[in-house]
Amino acid sequence: MRPWRLSLGQMLLIGTIDRFGSASAADLARALHLTPQAMTTLLRPLEERGVITRAVDPANRRRLALSLSSQGQAMHADICMAAERVDDQLTAALSDAELEQFRILLSKIAQRPSGEPVRKEIIQPPQGAQPAGKARRMKSQTP
């Protein structure tokens, strides 16, 4: 993120705009599970830097559609290539079978049946509390 001077949220937003092609700020906020205020905070610097553009949506003239500028498309392509290089380095020691299993496991972890974002209390358990997954693993390792 440093070479592009982007936050993780901005990188996710650029990727989402790339997938959508063009979308309203409200659509992007829903896709990323953000409030409209948080979306505006992410969008403003990207628009000021010329990474994204706003234009009247021809299908609905009351709606502004956001899309990546040519600079934003080039930035997204650079980010994707860098991510592929990192992925290659991180998985270089895995066999093809191990890599396939790793991807299957990551896919299972990433799936959330409800489509809801992970709640803060799940990410940060109360102080002194032991995360359920860790406790479950410790019990299974006890003879």
Image: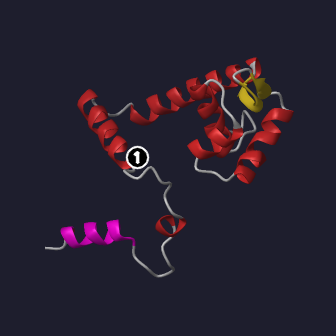
Q: Which residue is painted at 62% across and 21% down in the image?
A: 77
By secondary structure, the bulk of the magenta-drawn segment is best described as helix
- Image position of 125 with respect to 34: above or below: below
Which quadrant, please, contains the N terminus?
top right
Number of marks in the rendered image? 1
Residue 78 located left or right of residue 63? left
Q: Is residue 143 above or below residue 9?
A: below
The residue stretch that appears in magenta: 131-140
Q: Quadrant of residue 80?
A: top right
SS assignment at label 1: helix
Residue 4 percent across, percent down from the top left? 73, 33
Question: Picture coordinates of residue 73 (x, y %)?
Answer: 68, 21
Where's the C terminus, which quadrant?
bottom left
Task: Look at the image and say whether residue 138 sits in the magenta stretch.
Answer: yes
User: Callout 1 environment at 10 Å: few (<14), some (14 to 19), or many (20+)?
Assistant: few
Name the residue rendered at 26%, 66% in the picture: 137
Going by the picture, which residue comes out furthest to the bottom? 128
Q: Nearer the viewer, residue 3 or 123?
A: 123
Q: How far from the left and from the top, in percent, is residue 84?
A: 50, 27
Please, which residue is most extreme toward the left here? 143
Percent x, y for residue 105?
A: 31, 44
Q: Residue at x 51, y 32 (%)?
A: 86
